[in-house]
Each structure stands twice: as C-alpha cells, then as structure tokens.
Amino acid sequence: MNYDQNCLKLIQELTNAKGPSGFEDEVVTVARKYAGEFANIEEDRMRNVYFYRKKNTGNKPVVMLDAHSDEVGFMVHSIRPCGTLRVVNLGRWTNSTLPASKVKVRNSEGKWISGVFVNKPAHFRSAADNKAELQISELSIDIGACSAEEARDVFKIRMGEPVVSAAEFEFDEENGLMFGKSFDCRIGCAALIETMKRLNDAELDVDVVGVLSSQEEVGERGAKVSVNHIRPDVAICYEGCPADDTFTEPYAIQTALKKGPMFRHMDVSVICSPRLQRFVLDLAAEKNLLVQESVREGGGNDAAVIQTALDGIPAVTAGVPVRYIHAMNCITSYQDFEATVQLITEAVKNLNRDVINRF
C-alpha cells in the first residue's frame, strides 16, 4: 500500500499534540496549520475550531463533519506531602492499566515534565490489596520530587494542570500500523482534515463545514455549542472507536483492524439515523469500499448531541478502529484511515437536497 507522507505527518502531529479535555490548544494549532490552505477557519470560546469549505455558497444544504479534538487525560487534584501528585480523570480510563505508565504533566510555566503513575509496590501489597478494584484516588504521579514544597517550588506544579500519556507516534511501514496515544479521536481529526482537502476542488450540491469539537470525553460539551453554530442539515461524525478483534468471539467481531470504518447502528447514547446509515452502507457496497457495521452495547459520541439539536439532525458515526482506546498506548491502521477518508468523501459527493430530504 502507498502511504501519503503528508497524511502521516498530519496524523503524527495531531497524535503527539497534548490536548486533554479543556486543554485542546495544541491540537487546534496543528489543525489550523494543515487546513488553512483549503478552508476558512474560525474558533469559538469553547476552543471548537471550524473549517468552512472555500467553495461554500450559503444557499445549499449544510453537511457538518465532526471530530472531537480532546483526548482522555487527567488533572492535578493536589500534591501529597511526599511530593507525588494526586489526580482526577478527564474522561474514562481503565485504572488497572495505569500503574508504571509514563506521563507528561504541565507545570505553571507551560513546560511538560515527565512523571510515572505509581501504586504501592508488589513487595508491600497484601492479598486483599491485590484483589481490590483500583481507584484513581489511590494512585499517584511521581515526578521525582521529595516533598510537596519541592513539587511546588522547583517543579512548579500547581492544582488544575493537565496530564497526558507520554507515548509518541510510531509508524510500522511494513505492516501499515500506527502506534501512539490519543487516536481517539486524533485519527478522526486527521481523517476529517484530509476529507476536506480532497473535497477542495469538487463540485458539490452541498456546503461543507468541518469542526473539531472540544471536550467530548467529558460529555460532548463542545458539540453542544458547535452544532448550534453550524446549524447543519446532516452530520457525519468521525471517531477513533474501540476495536474488538483481539478478545471477542469471531462471530461477534464488529470492529476489526484493516476492515475499514465502523458505522454503528446504535450505542448507549444514540440510534444513528437509519436512512442516512443505509445510504452510507449501500454506497460503500456500490463503490466496493471497505466498511464495517456494528450494534454497540456501550460507548457514546457527538452524534448523540447533534442528532437531538435544533429540530433533529440526521447523524451517523464513522469509527476508525483503534485497539486499546482510553489507555496510554493505542494501535490503529493506515488502511482504515484511508478507507474512512475515501468513503466519507464519496458520501459527501453523493449528497444533495433531495437525498437529504429523504433522511
């Protein structure tokens, strides 16, 4: 498979950007750099960033392309007397995966310093300790300080600062695999930007507005603002969605790597627009494009907020499969990124007022 080096660079920079919920600034900076040549760009005070296709006319149906810019992370709650940091979650984590993970903590000077999630060492743990469910309040981040005073005065740590995984992007060219943090939803952000780039010169029967919505991981908060700002007629949300191909019975696998984007019929937050969903699935079959479909028993995404906004907006979600989302290290596939861009590009090209009115 051929790999577009510009796409890989975009994915790398978005993935490495440090942007937990509420602190998406670095992500916005990267997105602006790549989208500026083919989109008119705006921001709002939620740090939602909007990309308006330069060929928009203002008198066609509006297609909203959405991806969330934030990643799951942490916030400094307090400093323990020994100098370690107590934190709270920004988004949902599997707490058992955290001990010994390397992180980056922002200090009051804006510098990101290294730390490690720590728990009581195995040598000091009782059988009861090992059986108990791990709570985030029991964990600490060790930055190397020996006292609370040193953490504050030397390391410049203060309450309310963000914390993210320290994982860095890696690309396995031979196998088309990407390793890193925050593919939920930076791989979706990259796919959205690349889709708009490919639509740049197309003659469309719709106007297109892309948005990187903030604070999805803490309750789809940015999308509640962005959907009212755009007021779309139809929406397609990009996600980095949890792959289930390493632990699920073969008959039940619905989100496998290298099988294309996953379009969910439902999750616990939304029943995606059935007619829009069928439009995309039928188009994929007609064009011989990779696609997967699922019925999810968990999860949630911006489509739930968008669908119930205004007078109701048909919305579906395109999920790029990612192994081990909401963990410090994730795996995704360039093939699935490319397949997502291809399918949504085709979908937008085939939308018009009559088609949208049928949804």
Image (spheres, helix red, strand yellow):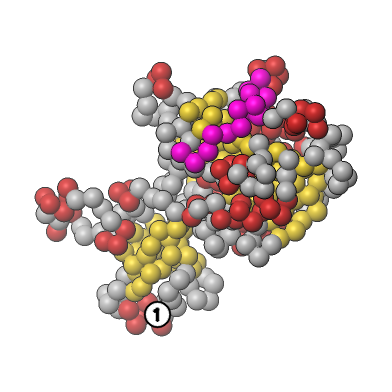
Is residue 257 in sight in this rendering?
Answer: no
Residue named by callout 1:
152
The image shows residue 3 at horizontal and vertical percentages of 66, 34
Q: Quadrant of the C terminus?
A: top right
The image shows residue 80 at horizontal and vertical percentages of 29, 74
Along the line of sight, which residue is nearer the eye, 151 or 229? 229
**Please, what secondary structure does the residue beneath circle 1 have?**
helix
Question: In this image, 311 relative to 61: left or right?
Answer: left
Residue at point 34%, 74% (across, down) = 79
Question: In this image, 205 relative to 306: left or right?
Answer: right
Count of marks, rendered view: 1
Along the line of sight, which residue is nearer the eye, 230 or 78? 230
Residue at point 50%, 46% (across, down) = 180
- Residue 187 on the magenta span: no
Three-letter code, disc 1:
Arg
The image shows residue 100 at horizontal and vertical percentages of 32, 54
Residue at point 67%, 44% (across, down) = 311
Instruction: Establish if 349 lies above or below 107.
Output: above
Along the line of sight, which residue is nearer the eye, 215 or 175? 215
Identify the magenta region: 268-282
Q: Quadrant of the N terminus?
A: top right
The image shows residue 288 at horizontal and vertical percentages of 67, 17
